[in-house]
Image (cartoon, rainbow, N blue to C red):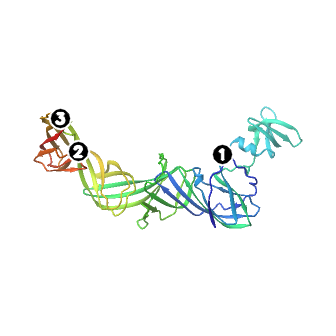
């Protein structure tokens, strides 16, 4: 057996398409790998039977979005492949009638105002709305092309996206033909549901395969590669959905591979064209979660007067023993047995045992006010006093992280009674506990050389 990778050649004419090999319609060992970058890798095997006199192989049913320069063929050493074409004949009146030139057709002729008669004739020429035919009594007449009736689609027309190879064989061959090719207009993404209850949560992950490749995949082995391979992404619109839920005993297999993560679906999957197919691949229960409250404030040297800021609220969890491919996360909880959406977010590719932080939105009851109370700038120094007030009108205590951008060089100083740290290099970070239904105020003096 030998493998040939063939470039797509245009403008080739098949010299003997009628002498084509017999290729089974049944696909064996079909598989599909979908990437999260608008790319798929198709593998198919079909039984091939050809005679030494055959000059072509017609492989019908490839995806419309086939990348023809990616085609990899595995066939017998006795067969030489000379050239390749991609063919797909969308049926039109012109193509059908052009293919019937020189062949018998039926013609509907007007007998009187309300009656037609059908005659048999040979189609001689097609000229748009008019065609020329020769009747059985050797009369040549012009008729409307719409009145020509044919009873089949000629073999010369290939009505499914197909690959055609010009070949030469040393002998008669019966073998299994293997084909691999890349397709576009197929993509997958991960979608997660996080159901929270107190300080615990359950997470369910769904793989959503969006297929617009122009091919239906029946009972195929489906795998997915999560990671950012070197490929330009393309936006893919949502269509309609087909859901595949797993039994608890059936798990999607995940393996790290060459810096990516490879997921194998453990059952055959049918993916129709123009369909989103969803498969559950993650379920983790009883996850410990933490609620976080953050506010990013103004640089004190640019703060003028008083400014109010919202407090963002987050859900965080860590310690999952599985990687999470990038995707959308929806956060739900229940109140009085009614499900409530608390927020939507997204995650990037997340390795296992990594902390995940999901922003839910801004907290209704917790606010921060920052106010300049004194400025003592000189030609050399910037000096400002800022008062921070945190109000918590909820019935539970809150710990709020405040992030204040500030110069951190050796000539800068911060004076305050509150403990602080530096995060991300230049963010002065305060962790302030505010009791329920109360306010907390503290002052900070910032000084820095200009």
Quadrant housing residue 258: bottom left
Q: In percent of the image, x 24 and y 51: which residue is there?
A: 292
Q: Are marks 1 and 2 in contact (CB under 8 Å)?
A: no
> Where does residue 376 sit, x and y in percent of width and height?
12, 35
The quarter of the picture where the C terminus appears is top left
Viewer-side residue, 114 vs 138: 138
Q: Residues within 10 Å of mark 1 (few under 14, many from 20)?
A: few
Q: Which residue is mark 3?
A: 306
Q: Is residue 127 visible?
A: yes
Q: Which residue is mark 1?
A: 90
Q: Secondary structure at mark 3?
A: strand
Q: Is residue 336 visible?
A: no
The quarter of the picture where the N terminus appears is bottom right
> Where does residue 203 sit, x and y in percent of width and height?
34, 58
Label for residue 295? 2
Cα separation, mark 2 vs mark 3, equals 16 Å
Tally the numbered discs.
3
Quadrant housing residue 441: top left
């Amino acid at each position: 057996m030998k493998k040939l990778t063939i470039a797509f050649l245009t403008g080739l004419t098949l010299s003997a398409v009628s002498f084509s090999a017999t290729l089974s319609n049944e696909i064996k060992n079909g598989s599909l790998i979908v990437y999260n970058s608008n790319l798929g890798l198709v593998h198919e095997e079909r039984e091939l039977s050809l005679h030494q006199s055959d000059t072509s192989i017609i492989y019908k049913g490839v995806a419309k979005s086939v990348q023809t320069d990616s085609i990899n063929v595995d066939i017998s050493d006795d067969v030489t492949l000379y050239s390749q074409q991609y063919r797909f004949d969308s049926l039109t009146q012109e193509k059908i009638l052009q293919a019937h030139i020189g062949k018998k057709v039926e013609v509907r002729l007007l007998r009187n105002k309300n009656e037609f008669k059908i005659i048999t004739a040979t189609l001689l020429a097609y000229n748009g709305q008019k065609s020329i035919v020769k009747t059985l009594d050797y009369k040549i007449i012009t008729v409307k092309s719409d009145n020509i009736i044919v009873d089949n689609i000629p073999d010369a027309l290939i009505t499914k996206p197909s690959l055609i190879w010009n070949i030469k064989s040393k002998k008669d061959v019966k073998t299994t033909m293997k084909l691999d090719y890349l397709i576009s207009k197929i993509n997958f993404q991960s979608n997660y549901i996080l159901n929270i209850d107190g300080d615990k949560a359950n997470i369910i992950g769904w793989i959503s395969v969006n297929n617009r490749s122009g091919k239906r995949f029946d009972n195929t082995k489906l795998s997915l590669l999560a990671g950012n391979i070197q490929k330009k992404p393309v936006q893919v619109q949502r269509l309609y959905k087909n859901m595949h839920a797993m039994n608890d005993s059936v798990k999607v297999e995940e393996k790290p591979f060459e810096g990516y993560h490879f997921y194998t679906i453990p059952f055959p999957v049918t993916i129709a064209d123009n369909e989103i197919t969803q498969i559950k691949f993650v379920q983790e229960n009883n996850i410990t979660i933490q609620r976080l409250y953050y506010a990013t404030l103004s640089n004190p040297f640019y703060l003028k007067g008083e400014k109010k800021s919202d407090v963002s609220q987050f859900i965080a969890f860590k310690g999952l023993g599985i990687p999470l491919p990038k995707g959308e996360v929806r956060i739900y909880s229940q109140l009085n047995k009614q499900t409530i959406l608390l927020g939507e977010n997204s995650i990037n590719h997340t390795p296992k045992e990594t902390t995940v932080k999901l922003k839910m939105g801004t907290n209704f009851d917790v606010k921060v006010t920052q106010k300049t109370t004194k400025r003592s700038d000189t030609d050399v120094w910037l000096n400002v006093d800022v008062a921070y007030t945190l109000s918590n009108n909820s019935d539970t205590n809150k710990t709020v992280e405040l992030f204040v951008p500030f110069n951190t060089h050796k000539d800068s100083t911060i004076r305050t009674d509150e403990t602080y740290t530096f995060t991300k290099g230049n963010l002065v970070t305060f962790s302030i506990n505010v009791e329920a239904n109360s306010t907390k105020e503290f002052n900070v003096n910032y000084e820095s050389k200009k």
